[in-house]
Structure formats: structure tokens, C-alpha cells
Amino acid sequence: MNWLYYLLEANLYLCVFYAGYCLFLNKETHYTLNRIYLLLSCVVSFVLPVVQIGWLKPVETVTKTIVIIPQTAYQTTVQKLTVRQTLTFNDIWVYAYILGIIVLTTVLFIRLYQLVKLTKATKTLVDGKYKLINIEGSNTAFSFFNYLFIGTKTQANNIIIRHELVHISSKTLS
């Protein structure tokens, strides 16, 4: 199996399962069911291309090339063939995929660096199981592991802090 076909099929299955999630489970409040569905759909999306469902199987074509080289008794000529490499559609997909990996990995590391910078630049208040970090001049609030980030312009701080503490205690994303 060509690995490019595998990646394309796996991404196709991921899109189908995610569309199913958006249509049926997105508004549900059973978060455990949602998490199980999302985790299992990721695993199934990477296993299904290996199983090869019939209509997605790539068609294998066998081509035979017969080369006849005329030879004479006194002289043997060898023709040198020049092979030009052309950019194919598959190559474009591979390069686009690699570019996407590079861009998204770069964005991930930039965001992680910004989080680390936020935790070191601001004052943190340790309160038992979490660290409260005030973000000056912002109205956002989120949690990341045991860190609770909250803006100084945020309304209803106590309600938001309680909400984020639920995420911290259950180790889920906010």
C-alpha cells in the first residue's frame, strides 16, 4: 500500500467521523461519550485504511515494457536515456502535507512558548492544586494543566474561576 493513499484515506475517515461528531454529538452534554467517540474515531480512522474497504482500494495496474535493442556482430550501441523528473500530482500532495506539518508544528511551539512566557512574566498565586495567573489588560480566561489564566478585565471572576477549576480537577481542556 502506498503511504500517500494511506494518509489520504485516514484523513478522509477523520473528516467523515468529525462531520458525524459535529452533526450529532457537538451539542450534547455527555462529555464522556463525546471524548470516547472522538478517541475511538481517531483510532478507527487510522486502522480502516489498513483493512482496505473495497471501493477505496487503489487499482493496481501492471505495465510491461519490452525494449528491443538491435545488435550487430561488429558494433554494439548503447543508447543513453535521459530521464526527466516531473512534478506529479502525488508529489504536490506530499509537499503540501509536509508543509502543513511544518506550519502547524511551528504554531504549536509558538503558542507553547507564549504560555511559558505568560507563566514566568506574571505573578502567580499558588492555591493548593492550581496556580492563578493574572493577564493584564485582557478579558480571556482559560486553564492549561494546573495553571488558571484569567484576564484582569474579566467579568464575574469567581464564576469563571470555579468553572476552570472543574476543568483542572477533571484534567480536561477548557
Image (spheres, grey):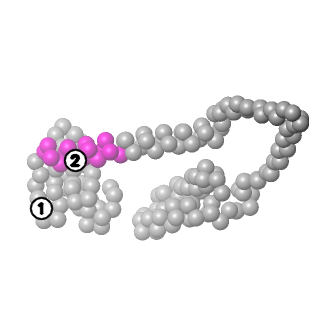
User: What is the x, y in percent for residue 3?
Assistant: 60, 53
Q: Can residue 146 be seen in this view?
A: yes
110 drawn magenta? yes
- Which secondary structure type mostly characterizes the magenta part of the structure? helix
Q: In which quarter of the image is residue 89?
A: top right
| Camera-nearest residue between 9 and 25 | 9
Q: Do the residues labelled 1 and 2 touch (CB within 8 Å)?
A: no
The residue type indicated by label 2 comes to Val
When asked about the image quadrant of residue 146, the answer is bottom left
Question: Residue 17: x and y, percent?
Answer: 57, 58
Q: Name the residue under label 1.
A: 127
Task: Inspect the image, locate mark 1, and give the three-letter code of the amino acid beneath it.
Answer: Asp
Position of 117 compared to 31: left or right? left
Q: Is residue 41 magenta?
A: no
The C terminus - image quarter: bottom left
| Residue on which the image places disc 2 | 116
Q: 137 or 76: nearer the eye?
A: 76
Q: Which of 173 and 65 is in front in this view?
A: 65
Q: Percent from the top left, x then y, of residue 118?
A: 19, 45
Dot 2 surroundings within 10 Å: few (below 14), some, or many (20 or more)? few
Circle 1 SS class: strand
- Which stretch appears magenta? 108-122
